[in-house]
Image (cartoon, rainbow, N blue to C red):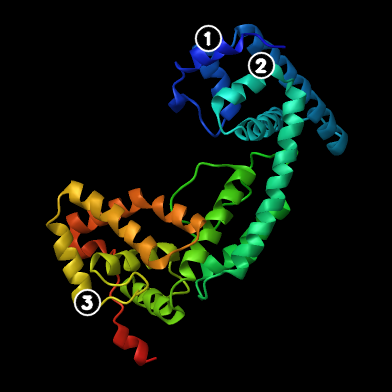
Amino acid sequence: MAYMDHDNVRDRFQLVNHYNIKKNKYTQSLISEALRVGMIPMELVDDIQMQVRGVLEQLLKEQRSLNGSQVDKERAQALLDSVFYAIDAYLLSFHDPLYAINALQGMCVEDMYQSGMKIIRSMICESVALSVKAKKTRIQTDNEAYNKTLDEDVHVFLDGYDYRFAGQQTVMPMQYRISGTTTAEGIFYLRSYLNRLYIENRFAAMFDSEEKALLFSVYAKQRKTTTRDMRVNLFALILNNALGAVILGKYAGILTLTEEESAALCHALQKKTVRMINQIAIDSIKNLIADMRPDPAVTAYLNGQAKQVIARLTAVKNEGEGAAMFIPSDPIELFKQ
C-alpha cells in the first residue's frame, strides 16, 4: 500500500541528508531520514515496526524450539539486528535510497526479509568463489598473517557464520591488513575484504617476483623483523615503490629503488606545496595505469587509492625519509641472490 504519490516522494527526496543514511543500520537510518523530511508518514513507520515484530517472533519461536528454552534479552536483540540486517541487504541492492524508500512503501516486511535472506545466501556463495580466486592469485610470500588469512581465517569465518540468526555478526576480522578500512559487518565485510584482496593480488602479479621478495625483505629488515612476522599490506608496499618509479620518470613496473633515488624523492617532495602533492598523487596513479595497463577492476581500485597516496606523500613531505614510503631495494641485490 502506497502512502504518498511518487511525485511528492521525489520532491521530498531533495531534502534528504545522505550523511544521515548509514550503510550499517541502513533500514533504520533510512526510515528516520525519510520520516524527518516527510517522505513517509508515522503510520507507515508504525506499520513497519509491527511487521518486524512479527518476523522477530517467528525467529524467537524457532530459537526456542532449537534450544528448548526461553531466549534472553541479549539474544532477542541479536535476532532483531539479524532481521534488520537481512532487510538492509535487500534495500541496499537498489543502490539508491529513493528506490529503497519506494520499496519500504510498497512491500511488506516479510517479503523484504526473505528477499534479503536470498541476497545474503548469494553473497556467501560469492565469498567462497572469491576466496578460491584469491588463493589462485596469491602473492608468493612467507608472511604468516597473509597466508593464514587465505588458508584458515576465511574458512573459520564461513564455518561459523550463522546467516539466519546472526547475519550481522562478523565472526572474526581477518589477520592480514587490507588497504583502507571498512565499517561493513557480517558477510558484507567478508565479501568486501575478499574482493579487495583478490584485486590487490592481481595488481601484485604484474610485478617481478624477485623484486617483490627483495622489497618485502628490505622492509622487514628496516622494521627489525622478518617477512614472516611483519604486519603490513603487501599491496601498499608494491604500490608505493611503483609510484616512486613513476615520479622519478621511470617505468612503473620497476620496484627497485636505490638509496639515492629514495632520498631524491623525499627531498623533492619536501619542497612541494599541498596542492602540488595532490596533483602528483593523481598524476602518478594515472601514469602508472598508462604504463601497466591493468584490467578495469584493478584500474578502478588504483584510482580509489588517491586519498591514501596523498596522505602518504604528505607524510613524506612533512617527515622526509622518516616517513619511509619508498623502500630502497637496490637492483644490485638481485644479482647477489
One can see residue 270 in this view: yes
> Which type of secondary structure does the marked residue at label 3 adopt?
helix
> Which quadrant of the structure image shows residue 216?
bottom left
User: Which residue lies at the image location 58% right of the left edge and 42% below the top edge?
Assistant: 185
User: Which residue lies at the image location 34% right of the left edge and 68% below the top edge?
Assistant: 242
In the rendering, at what x and y percent does residue 118 appear?
75, 39
Q: State which mark lies toward you, 3 or 1.
A: 1
> Which type of secondary structure does the marked residue at label 1 adopt?
loop
Crowding near the residue tagged with mark 3, few <14, some 14–19, many ≥20 C-alpha atoms within 10 Å: some
- Say above or below: 294 vs 311: below
* Quarter of the rendering occupied by the N terminus: top right
- Which disc, if any, is residue 105? 2
Residue that protrudes farthest toward the bottom in the picture: 336
Q: Which residue is mark 3?
A: 259
The Cα atoms of the two marked residues, 3 and 1, are separated by 62 Å
The Cα atoms of the two marked residues, 1 and 2, are separated by 13 Å
Left or right placement of residue 248 versus residue 59 in this view: left
Q: Which residue is mark 1?
A: 38
Amino acid marked by disc 3: Glu
In the rendering, at what x and y percent does residue 55 appear?
77, 24
In the rendering, at what x and y percent does residue 119 appear?
70, 40
One can see residue 56 in this view: no
> Which quadrant of the structure image shows residue 321?
bottom left
Left or right placement of residue 116 versus residue 136 in this view: right
